Amino acid sequence: MTATRVRGKQSDRKRQRSPRPRQCRADAEVKTKEVACSKRKRRWTVNDVHNSVLKVFVWHVQPNYKQPWCSEAQTSSTSSAWPIRLNGALRVVTNAHSVEHAALVQVKRHRHEQKYVAQVLCIGTDCDLALLEVPHADFWKGLEPLEILPGLPKLQDSVSVVGYPTGGESLSVTQGVVSRIDLVEYAQTGVTLLAVQIDAAINSGNSGGPVVDQKGNCVGVAFQNLDGDEESAENIGYIIPTEIVQHFLEDFLKNGHFTGFGSAGIHTQALESPVLREALGMAKNQSGIRVKAVETAGPANGIILPDDVLLAVDGFKIGNDGEVAMPWGRVAFNYLLNRHYPGEHCEMQVLRREGSPKKITLQVCLERNRDLVCADAGGPDATAGSMLPRFLVTGGLVFVPLTMPFMEAAFGENFAEKRPAEMPAELLHLLENGHRRCADHEPLILTQVLASELTVGYSELEYEVLESFNGIQVRNLRHLAELLDGSKDTYLRFGFVSKEIVVLDRLKATQALASILAQNMIPAARSQL
């Protein structure tokens, strides 16, 4: 099994291009055994499973990332969920996208009429999972938590998707078989993780529901399917395997919040050419992949070098195609990195040419898998998965971080495929090829210039990538605020990647800011940075 390749390169941060999965959007140090449910004294029946599947009702208030001092109109959705026993406490598991931007979450049991208010304890955006608490004793009376089955299902295993899809109010059960186990792009953030493909339909509203085997054990969580526009995409669904679910739950138990999946920040090239292997000094019995780039702000910088040959990760030998052999099949090597938590060390064996080629065993402290233009909106210092919108207005210039939520707000959810004409090439370059200059680097965008006497001559500028302020390279939104606050210069000079510049009189910009904000009904010049 192989992960889908993107732009002809291998990376531990892959994105699959086609077919593109989409979310099944709703309607509109602990041990694994502590995460699993307690053993039962009786046989688990089909009716028990049905009684343990919950319906989730959510009211969403999504921020407007293009104008982040505003929010969109409220929307509502329904989805599915299921209970677990986590370290002795009863909790509810569903999808992250089912409860994102939630103003109110309610859950209802099968064949019950009352809805109970739930609280979101943790959201794991990368793996599209969320953990809920329902602090009502009556809700839990007679409700049995599902058993999480360790490991992965086998190909051709029969499974059932249980949930509340659109088309009715009652519980729905769809049966199918496991058809593939592979690395897949999770539509919520674009991170590539392990997923199980099944031939049972996963429809809108099934999101977050359990997928169970013939014994009633939970083998995964329904979360997305192939885009219906794709050829032969009918009845192709994906479930989050329990291996990923357990990673998320253990992460919450250890850290109190989601921290993510490990990444080394390296980009590699397959070595299927025997001439290339010989040129790199590899013996005939050796296999591996060439490291073609190491991200400057990545955890492997200074440890792994370009032109190193990566031979093994955590003792697993890497093939010349970049894959490793697991008990259930072959998979891209970055799967081994994803099994770690950020902050954990990973053992990597490389072949390095220092005179004569020699093997070197290295330890790399992994970090969270995060692209330069990422799904997080909260900034470099925020908790993983933070969706807090941020902005800064100075002299009528509106700056926001360049994030995936901003791109979707400005250019539509399918901007990567449609590539609208109004989307500048600089943004596309950062999206596809950008890397952090430093650990807290985030690109900033001049989204618009608020018209006033102060900004005459600049009003047509939009979607410009900020490069510098008064000759100083800007790292992030907070850094820009600090530079503005500390400036004593006569002029405020903003330089952009496009080579455009904007120069404002500092004193006039300060004096005019309050009236510009009032005229445009902006409540403050800055959000929380």
Image (cartoon, rainbow, N blue to C red):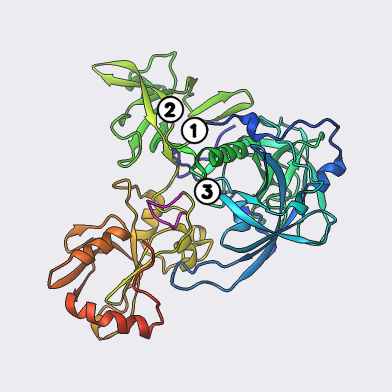
Residue 271, percent across and down? 42, 27
Q: Amino acid at mark 2?
A: Cys
Could you tell me which residue is drawn at 75 percent across and 61 percent down? 115
- Residue 497 appears in the picture as rendered: no
Verify whether residue 472 appears in magenta.
no
Say which residue label 3 marks.
17
Task: State whether residue 429 is above or below residue 33.
Answer: below
Foreground mark, 2 or 3, reads 2
Q: Amino acid at mark 1?
A: His
The disc placed on residue 346 is 2
Foreground mark, 1 or 3, reads 1
Cα separation, mark 2 vs mark 3, equals: 28 Å
Going by the image, does 229 lie left or right of 339? right
Could you tell me which residue is drawn at 53 percent across and 47 percent down? 126
- Residue 351 appears in the picture as rendered: yes
Going by the image, does 450 lie left or right of 166? left
Q: Nearer the viewer, residue 123 or 141?
A: 141
Place residue 510 in its image quadrant: bottom left
Cα separation, mark 1 vs mark 3, equals: 25 Å
The disc placed on residue 340 is 1
The disc placed on residue 198 is none
